[in-house]
Image: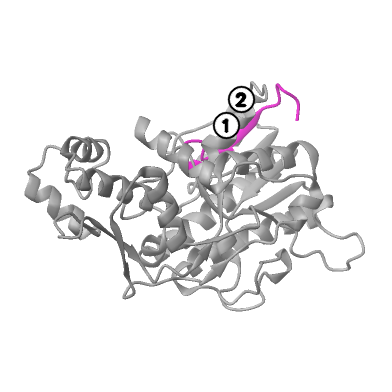
Amino acid sequence: MQKDSKIYIAGHRGLVGSAIVKNLTARGYTNLVTRRHAELDLTDALAVADFFDRERPEYVILAAAKVGGIVANNTYRAEFIYENLMIQNNVVHQSYLHQVKKLLFLGSTCIYPKACPQPMKETYLLTDPLEYTNEPYAIAKIAGIKLCESYNLQYGTNYISVMPTNLYGPNDNFDLEKSHVLPALIRKIHLGKALENEDWDSVRADLNRLPIEGVNGEASTSDIKGILEKYGLQPNLEDGVSVEIWGSGKPMREFLWSEDMADACVFLMQERDFKDTYSKDTTEVRNTHINIGTGTDVSIADLANLISEIIGFKGTFVFNTDKPDGTMKKLTDVSKLHDLGWKHNISLKEGIQKQYDWYLKQ
């Protein structure tokens, strides 16, 4: 890619896309094309075709997706499979029709089987059933991988698929109903610290920034306590404040700072091609996607304790075992990525501190 190459970043306002835009800008790329959802609905085939006709990008980074945590994935199953399939089908097909030089498709490590051997190698894709709660989303992302592979093999395109592990960073979603585990824990523990310090100004400021089910900082104290208790914050216990965590706390999870992920994506767009993602000795080209992660993991319980240490929360955690744990261990094998020439830089402790500092400034 040249510094003035026209690069379309789909999903530029999200956690993934915003980090990629920041990385490209810092590297001196000056011709970035973006569209908000209100300007371009990527599930609309005609609108996407018209956009490509007008803009004719040379490179495409497909970071747009409908994403969410366990509850959202399991509740909005039809929306997750339909919208993600439509987004990727439209963007990939129009990239082919308009002769895009290279495309990067982003998915997630939830594509792997529920009982996948650990750490998860790219070759384990489609070897066993998926985790039920996120099966529709995972099926869509697997279809995206196969879409890119198939266009490459039939049409000679240069599309690369990457599967990041659990991401966190600037522009993350802190909605307690729909967010992933790490930003949800940061917010709940931040509120827990404010409650144990009886710092209602901080509680109200937080709710004004991001209301919970319509309850903002202008609500009565009783209404605020009620909504916080609904989401697992108990402020009036004799032994201090407690924070509820879904599940047993035993599942192991891997986390990657989003700006590290962006750096890996830009590296691959600059330095590697589809032909680099598989062995030249094979007769069947499969599993060309690339895991992006750290190769290390942590239990949810230890993650909560680490966040508490950083934030300064001294309360307790209550593990609600009536709620699902999800897959007990999800650790990526990142040897393929390392062999291609990239490794992560930000440790989990450093990343959580950066994430919390970002949250406080919003």
- Name the one closer to the observer, 31 or 133: 133
x and y, in percent, of residue 162 in the image: 66, 52
Against 108, residue 311 (above or below) is: above
Choose top left, top right, bottom left or bottom right for residue 232: bottom left
- Name the one closer to the observer, 62 or 154: 62
Most frequent secondary structure within the magenta stretch: loop
Left or right, 180 with respect to 60, comes to left
- Tag 2 residue: 25
Q: What residue is rendered at 35% in x and 54% in y?
A: 178
Label 1: few (<14), some or many (≥20) within 10 Å? many
The magenta segment is: 1-15
x and y, in percent, of residue 133 in the image: 44, 70
Q: Is residue 27 magenta?
A: no
Residue extending farthest to the right is 281
Q: Which mark is residue 21?
A: 1
x and y, in percent, of residue 294 in the image: 64, 53
Residue 100 can be seen in this image: no
Give the residue type at disc 2. Thr
